[in-house]
């Protein structure tokens, strides 16, 4: 008896999208644009976080307002981050800045390209649109229970993102990444010389630096949770889908 997975694409006309999909079925889940952006973004975020911690070691204190220096009261004093998590491993502010600025460009233009692609092929409208019923307390609680029991996909609609995936992707794509990019632009002397209103909008250089650190921390936490859920959902299956685009419906 042949038990190999049957590859399928989108539902054919006249079929019911809510019919259960047999376990083991291979589904085309991620397009080429999503896969390319995912891996470029993964490298950029890892380098940006590592180099950002290296920059933080130069002055591990955060302030609000326009000014902040050694003897000013800080709202947060950061630890000195160990060498194994910073880029480069040895303390070198100049090299950390070079890595950070280069991969900030990679992140920014990569996100811009992905946004254009997602709008042009209706990826955002098709996959990330939140429906009213998904935000009902009963639906949210059902998704919490499903995640608690390690059921991350609806067997009737395995291609669809669940509501927590939609909320987290909307938050990272349309809030955290743009906020990190905007505050990074504000911290660049060359950019704020031409766009001084960006610093004014954010409340000053030190406020921009604090917001930048908070956004980066949230992106780092999202990355950790994302990796944990990938492992729990089946790392091999999830990795294959993000490399080849094909994902197998689990039991």
Image (spheres, rainbow, N blue to C red):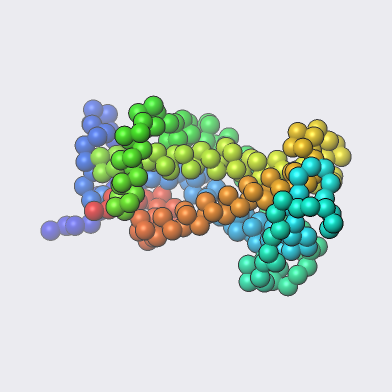
User: Foreground: 102 or 192?
Assistant: 192
The answer to whether residue 127 is above or below residue 1 is: above
In this rendering, position of residue 222 left or right of residue 28: right
Q: Answer with left or right where residue 152 lies relative to residue 182.
A: left
Q: Residue at x 26, y 33 (%)?
A: 17
Farthest residue toward the left?
1
For the question of whether residue 105 can be seen, the reply is no
- Quadrant assignment, res 69: bottom right
Furthest residue to the right?
193
Q: Position of residue 90 (x, y in %)?
A: 73, 72
Task: Report the residue at 79% width, 42% height from top.
Answer: 65
Could you tell me residue 150's position as x and y percent? 31, 53
Residue drawn at x 77%, y 37% is 203
Residue 179 visible in image: yes
Residue 87 sits in quarter: bottom right
Horizontal side of residue 208 vs 176, given as left or right: right
Q: Residue at x 37, y 41 (%)?
A: 162
Q: Which image quarter holds the N terminus? A: bottom left
Residue 39 on image: x %, y %? 54, 54
Residue 105 rendering spot, x and y as whole percentages: 70, 48
Image-quadrant location for residue 144: top left
76 to the left or right of 31: right
């Amino acid at each position: 008896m042949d038990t190999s997975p049957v590859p399928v694409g989108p539902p054919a006309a006249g079929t019911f999208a809510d019919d259960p999909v047999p376990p083991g079925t291979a589904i085309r889940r991620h397009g080429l644009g999503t896969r390319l952006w995912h891996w470029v973004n993964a490298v950029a975020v890892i380098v940006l976080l590592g180099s950002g911690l290296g920059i933080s070691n130069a002055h591990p204190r955060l302030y609000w307002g326009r000014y902040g220096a050694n003897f000013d009261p800080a709202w947060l004093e950061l630890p000195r981050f160990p060498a194994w998590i910073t880029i480069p491993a040895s303390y070198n502010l100049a090299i950390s800045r070079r890595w950070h600025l280069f991969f900030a460009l990679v992140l920014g233009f990569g996100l811009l390209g992905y946004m254009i692609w997602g709008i042009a092929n209706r990826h955002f409208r098709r996959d990330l649109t939140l429906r009213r019923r998904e935000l009902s307390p009963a639906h949210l609680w059902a998704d919490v229970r499903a995640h608690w029991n390690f059921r991350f996909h609806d067997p009737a609609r395995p291609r669809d993102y669940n509501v927590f995936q939609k909320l987290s992707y909307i938050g990272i794509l349309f809030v955290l990444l743009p906020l990190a990019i905007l505050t990074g632009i504000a911290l660049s002397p060359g950019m704020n010389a031409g766009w001084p209103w960006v610093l004014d909008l954010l409340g000053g250089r030190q406020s921009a630096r604090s917001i930048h650190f908070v956004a980066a921390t949230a992106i780092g936490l999202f990355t950790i949770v994302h990796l944990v859920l990938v492992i729990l959902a089946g790392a091999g299956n999830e990795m294959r889908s993000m490399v080849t685009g094909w994902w197998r419906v689990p039991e």
